[in-house]
Every structure is written in C-alpha cells, then in structure tokens.
Image (cartoon, helix red, strand yellow):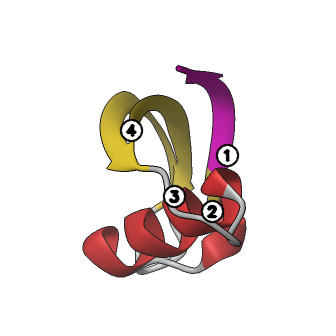
Amino acid sequence: MNVKVHYRITQDRAGIPQDFAGARRFARSEGQAIEDLAKAQLAADYQIPTSAVVICRIED
C-alpha cells in the first residue's frame, strides 16, 4: 500500500536555511514506521541530515 507523505526541508546540504515543501509517495512496509522510512529516504535523496527533514502530514 502506498502512502503520501508531505514534508518540509529546513536546510540544504551546506547547512544554509531553506524553506522547501513537497510531497512524495512511499510504499508502506511491515515492521518499520513510515515516518522514519520517509525521513531517511528524503535525507539520502537530497543529501542532507535527517534532522533537516520535517514530516508535516501522512495520507493513506
């Protein structure tokens, strides 16, 4: 099952403050929280620390 995650990026990979918002679909997997999965994947994609990713809303 896919869920839609709305997120906000608070800084870029150089540490400069940003204000970017977006949404992406993620596949829900058993045994792992979707918020943790989404934060880790978004941080890897944008090459930023996970602390720079803020999950705003999760839609089923």
Q: Residues within 10 Å of mark 4 (few under 14, many from 20)?
A: few
Q: Which residue is mark 3?
A: 38
Measuring 61% from the left and 26% from the top, which residue is drawn there? 58
**Residue 13, picture quadrant:** bottom left
Q: Position of residue 12 (x, y in %)?
A: 42, 65
Q: Residues within 10 Å of mark 2 (few under 14, many from 20)?
A: some
Secondary structure of residue under mark 2: helix
CA distance for labels 1 and 4 = 22 Å
> Who is closer to the viewer here, 13 or 59?
59
Q: Give the mark toward the camera: 1 or 3.
A: 3
Classify 17 as above or below 42. Answer: above
Stretch in magenta: 54-60
Q: Which residue is mark 2?
A: 52
Of callouts 1 and 4, which one flags the residue occurring earlier in the amino acid sequence?
4
Of callouts 1 and 3, which one flags the residue occurring earlier in the amino acid sequence?
3
Q: Give the mark toward the camera: 4 or 3.
A: 4
